[in-house]
Image (tube, rainbow, N blue to C red):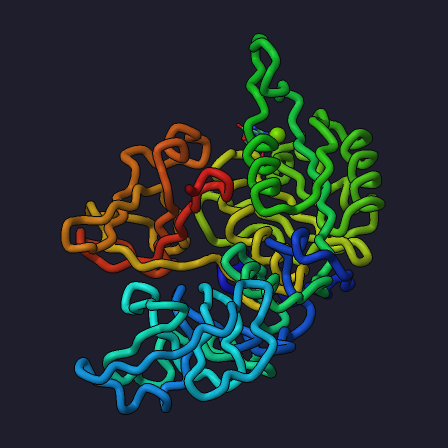
Amino acid sequence: MISVEEAQAKVLEQVEPLGIEAVDLMASVGRVLAETLIAPHDLPPFDNSAMDGYALRSHDTLAATLSAPLPMRIVGESVAGGSYPYPLRSGEAVQIHTGAPIPEGADTVLPLEQAQIHDGMVVVDTPVRSGMHIRPKGLDVKAGEPLLEAGMRLQTTHMGLLAALGLTPLKVYRRPRVALITTGSELLPYDAPLKPDAIRDSNSVLLRLWLSAWGVPFQFLGIVPDAEEPTLEALKKAVREAEVVLLTGGASVGGRDWVKPALQKLGAETVFWRVKMKPGKPLLFARWQKTAIFGLPGNPLASVVGLLRFVRPYLRALEGEIQTLPPCWTARLGTPVQKNETRAEFRTARLTVDEEGVLWATPTPAQGSSLLGSLFRANAFLYLPAGERYYPAGTPLKVLPILPMEGASW
Ligand code: AMP
Ligand code: MG
């Protein structure tokens, strides 16, 4: 048996990033960049007005006073999408709209609200400072400025700037293809009526929904009964079609656990089997040629811990992402916890924020690898490393937040 950290390292050692493809900007959100992005030009690309008003030469207004106001002749208009084509001469003003180019020679904008207009003239009765209400070229981003590094995942918040800079198509890493198999002769599809001695397959539902939320393409190869031949057949199909194979169940030591014998027949190499953690001890990681095979335990919470803690980082690394490990937050323990010191534990917990803004993690009252009800009530896993036995309430501990599915977060 190996520790969580050793298992983590062994999984990530096996990664060989996938190929690169060019995709349209609109399709690139959620993908991992395979190139460094540099601003190809300034943004805004030209000096423009931040207000509706009049573009002036500030120098012309220096002598303006209330008793001796100065008139500027309105010689034209600069609108968004259409600039005033001539240089502004002394004593001239150009009517300007928000976002419209500042005419050559003008260096300030007098807002509409402050402008007095008489007979086609802007009458200025105090000097106007240079540079007022002008958004200079390059204010937002300068040409040549580094924007994103290869290995960063593109977020919706990035896309406005990339669109403004015309950065399309973008080079991104190919997405890994995943095949999913659930094993167990007791399993029924989730939409089947219950039968004696049977339970519904909840693992593949959780796994499929998580993979979908991460945007990982997958094939569900269905429920395989506990027998060597069907397990081997499903595995053969899976390794032909996918770079990552996920199995759930059938990897313990019971006489009816066929995943290991089937992997052996296939000729796969076992990298490790069993990790010092609870739940999720019977986790298996194997390799067949370039395909990674995760034998996740059958117990629902054990398969979820395996998915979030080991499969997800592997998928991220395969996609070339720099940040492979899950976000790790620190929260104070809500109730005291006692545990066995030899294994690390992942406990289902609820994260809450108190009035002072402090994050608390309170373990769900029931803990057990088969208890779907505990996962149902949780929004995080509390991580208790091996080596400790007792944690008093208030101890700062690491938590693995279970983030809302993308579409549901807002
Ligand atoms: P196994 O690892 O196959 O021995 O399964 C361990 C426990 O998890 C058993 O109680 C199984 O019935 C249960 N189990 C296995 N696969 C699933 C599944 N897909 N959905 C729900 N429970 C499962
Ligand atoms: Mg089973």
Q: Residue furthest left?
A: 355
The residue positioned 60% from the left and 54% from the top of the image is: 30
**Above or below for 233 versus 316:** above
Looking at the picture, tell me which residue is in the foreground, 277 or 160: 160
Would residue 67 be found to the left or right of residue 143 on screen?
left
In this rendering, the count of numbered labels is: 0
Looking at the picture, tell me which residue is in the foreground, 148 or 43: 43
The residue positioned 53% from the left and 64% from the top of the image is: 79
- Residue 183 quadrant: top right
Would residue 273 be found to the left or right of residue 119 on screen?
right
- Residue 303 quadrant: top right
- Residue 125 quadrant: bottom left
**Above or below for 157 versus 193:** below
Q: Quadrant of ligand 2?
A: top right
- Quadrant where the image shows the C terminus: top left
Q: Can residue 395 be spotted in the picture?
A: yes
Q: Can residue 6 be spotted in the picture?
A: no
Looking at the picture, tell me which residue is in the foreground, 288 or 354: 354
Q: Position of residue 69 (x, y in %)?
A: 25, 81
- Quadrant where the image shows the N terminus: bottom right
Looking at the picture, tell me which residue is in the foreground, 284 or 405: 405
Q: Position of residue 385 (x, y in %)?
A: 37, 58
Q: Position of residue 4 (x, y in %)?
A: 49, 58
The residue positioned 36% from the left and 38% from the top of the image is: 378
The residue positioned 21% from the left and 47% from the top of the image is: 334
**Above or below for 290 versus 253:** below
